[in-house]
Image (cartoon, helix red, strand yellow):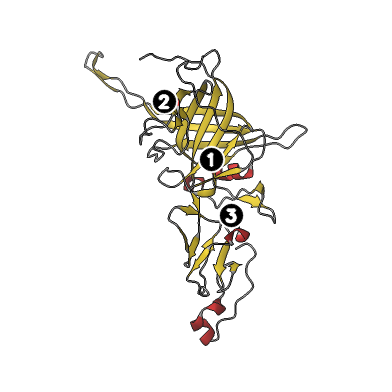
Amino acid sequence: MSNNCFPLVRGRVMRATALDGCGRPKAGACGSVTTDGFVSVAFTANTDEGEEISVTNASGKVCVRDAACPTLTGYTAVITFCEVNPELYAMLTGQAAVYDWQGNAVGFRVNSDRSACDYGFALELWSSVPQVACDPENVNAQGSFGYILVPFMQGGTLGDFTIENAAVSFTINGAATKTGSGWGVGPYNVVGGSGGTAGPLLEPIQSGDHLHVQLTDVAPPAASCDCTSTGVPATGATAGNPGTWTPVDSYAPSNLAGMTGVTASPNTAWGSGEHVVLGNNTKAHWNGTAWAADSAALAADPEATATGKGKREPADASA
């Protein structure tokens, strides 16, 4: 076995993947975004310097000394972008993307009531590796690339920016790595496997892993402004407040128009307040014949109707 040394230069593309609370890839219509619209990703190592024990004797000489042992606690990142990618910003910060009437992401909002620590993401970066030849025995090699994985991050916030006679750069600050990653070997083919066939990581990410760096002969994914889905789309919706999607670990349609073909359970009109939450954070319910916006009206509740309390105030447009 040989030890491969390699240089890393420049950043080629970045891929962010939404994670659940256990650090596992999260099913969703916008599960990942791959972009080359970034300027830099700056990592800072955070360490606990520990405590040194030192005791001096009566003559002032050190008689006991145990040096401190620094411990890595993780990394924080500052990500600077040269383009606005609304759904990527939402993934990294937990803020909301803004959509137009067709359901296209056209902007973002920043709300102090949203906590970035309620959302997680994984970050993959690819670099160029100059002057390193491909393995001559691997006929499937696509080139030589540096692959950097940060398997579990949280806490990104939108930083300072200036509107002036120059390009506007947006920065995500404060995103920090976490222990307890559920990434495993990952959902993507990023390294060469048996016979040179592209596959996931050969060894799973461990709970305490904050950073993974390696040489790979699998080319990075193509950059795109659009999101890529992870998991499978929902085919059924069960009433509740909120309701659930089936099959398990499926993702919601992005908007009301996407509910076409989704089976309602029960197939009769849903009761008062029952709804499911769509991918754009709006609500939908089954009125007995079709999918409709918002939660089911009070008039759909037989008890409310019988007591004369079935009248419903106009829906809040922000619900």
| Residue 58 position (above or below residue 88) | above
Q: Distance between the residues labelled 1 and 3?
A: 24 Å
**Could you tell me how many numbered marks the image carries?**
3
| Residue 102 position (above or below residue 213) | below
Q: Can residue 242 be seen in this view?
A: no
Of tags 2 and 3, the one toward the viewer is 2
* Residue sitting farthest toward the right: 165
Left or right placement of residue 14 versus residue 62 in this view: right
| Crowding near the residue tagged with mark 1, few <14, some 14–19, many ≥20 C-alpha atoms within 10 Å | many
Q: In which quarter of the image is residue 305?
A: bottom right
Amino acid bearing label 1: Gly
Q: Where is residue 142 in the image (x, y as percent from the top left)?
A: 53, 24
Q: Earlier in the sequence, mark 2 or mark 3?
A: 2
Q: Which of 1 and 210 is in front in this view?
A: 1
Identified at 59% across, 70% down, the residue is 290
Residue corresponding to mark 1: 156
Image quadrant containing the C terminus? bottom right
Q: Earlier in the sequence, mark 2 or mark 1?
A: 1
Residue corresponding to mark 3: 254
Residue 40 badge: none
| Crowding near the residue tagged with mark 3, few <14, some 14–19, many ≥20 C-alpha atoms within 10 Å | many
| Residue 30 position (above or below residue 262) | above
Q: Where is residue 13 in the image (x, y as percent from the top left)?
A: 58, 30
Q: Nearer the viewer, residue 248 or 273?
A: 248
Residue corresponding to mark 2: 195
Q: Earlier in the sequence, mark 1 or mark 3?
A: 1
Of tags 1 and 3, the one toward the viewer is 3
Identified at 60% across, 45% down, the residue is 87
For the residue labelled by badge 2, is the local secondary structure a helix, a strand or a loop?
Answer: helix
Identified at 52% across, 66% down, the residue is 275
Q: Distance between the residues labelled 2 and 3?
A: 40 Å
Amino acid bearing label 2: Gly
